[in-house]
Image (tube, rainbow, N blue to C red):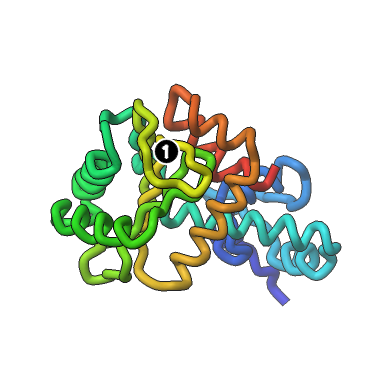
Amino acid sequence: MEKKYLTIKQTSSFLKVTDSVIKEMIKSKVFKAVKKGNSYVINKVEVDEWLANLNEREVEQLALKRSVCRFSDYFKLKYIYLDFSADNKYEAIAEMSKRAKDLKIVKDHRWLYQVVVAREELVSTAIGKSVALLHPRHLHPSKIKKPSIILGRSKKEIDFDAMDKKPVNIFFMLLLHDDIQHLFSISYISKLLMNEKIINIVKTAKTKEEIFNSLTKGVIL
């Protein structure tokens, strides 16, 4: 029987992880990549055998890597908005709404501002540790072009009626299409927030790259 080979992209798709994870596995000699034509490929039998022989800890690590891959579907480097100016919660929501329009995630930033403020006035979305998870009260897939998560950091700490009474300057804006995406994203971000090192990076980093790497790689360290 002829051997079946997978490209790096096909392997990452099969395992539901990022291309960078597969490249790291090749570098660590988990998989052997061979040159076939103009690209490197991996024998699928080798991948299947690796999956079949994972121990409990390795299964957990693979699940975390898959979560990172899924989060990366919604969260991109360009979605990070550093050190914007706002004096209160309404100005912060307005800035994040404008950013969503600039990124072509929504057409109407005024509509987004209104629905997020309406949600905020029911109960604060501040969850502690200087973080708020902004989102509309209801899902609006017809208004949101693609499931996305924006991260904004304001220069000032802003009173957001947080349960821990602390002001907020880190804002995740969740613009998603369904409950599964929404619940997954809240769970993923909540896990990140348990890591004080990651929180500190988000609060103090000077570059978007440093924040992006901490949120898409830090959870699996």
Residue 96 seen in render: yes
Residue 198 placement (x, y as % from top left): 59, 36
Q: Residue at x 46, y 43 (%)?
A: 131
Q: Residue at x 79, y 58 (%)?
A: 58
Q: Residue at x 82, y 58 (%)?
A: 57
Residue 24: image quadrant is top right
Badge 1: few (under 14), some or many (20 or more) residues near its Cα, within 10 Å?
A: many
Q: How many marks?
A: 1
| For residue 114, side relative to residue 139 (left or right) | left
The disc labelled 1 sits on which kind of residue?
Val
Residue lying at the far bottom in this picture: please name it: 1
- Name the image quarter holding the N terminus: bottom right
Task: Check disc 1 and report the residue beneath it.
Answer: 168
Residue 148: image quadrant is bottom left
Residue 75 placement (x, y as % from top left): 42, 50
Tell me: residue 193, above or below residue 111: above
Q: Residue at x 73, y 55 (%)?
A: 61
- Name the image quarter holding the C terminus: top right
Q: Nearer the viewer, residue 72 or 86?
A: 86
Residue 29 placement (x, y as % from top left): 78, 45
Tell me: residue 11, above or below residue 167: below
Tell me the SS state at disc 1.
strand
| For residue 205, side relative to residue 35 (left or right) | left
Q: Nearer the viewer, residue 35 or 113?
A: 113
Q: Nearer the viewer, residue 156 or 165?
A: 165
Q: Nearer the viewer, residue 136 or 89?
A: 89
Residue 207 placement (x, y as % from top left): 44, 26
Residue 23 seen in render: no
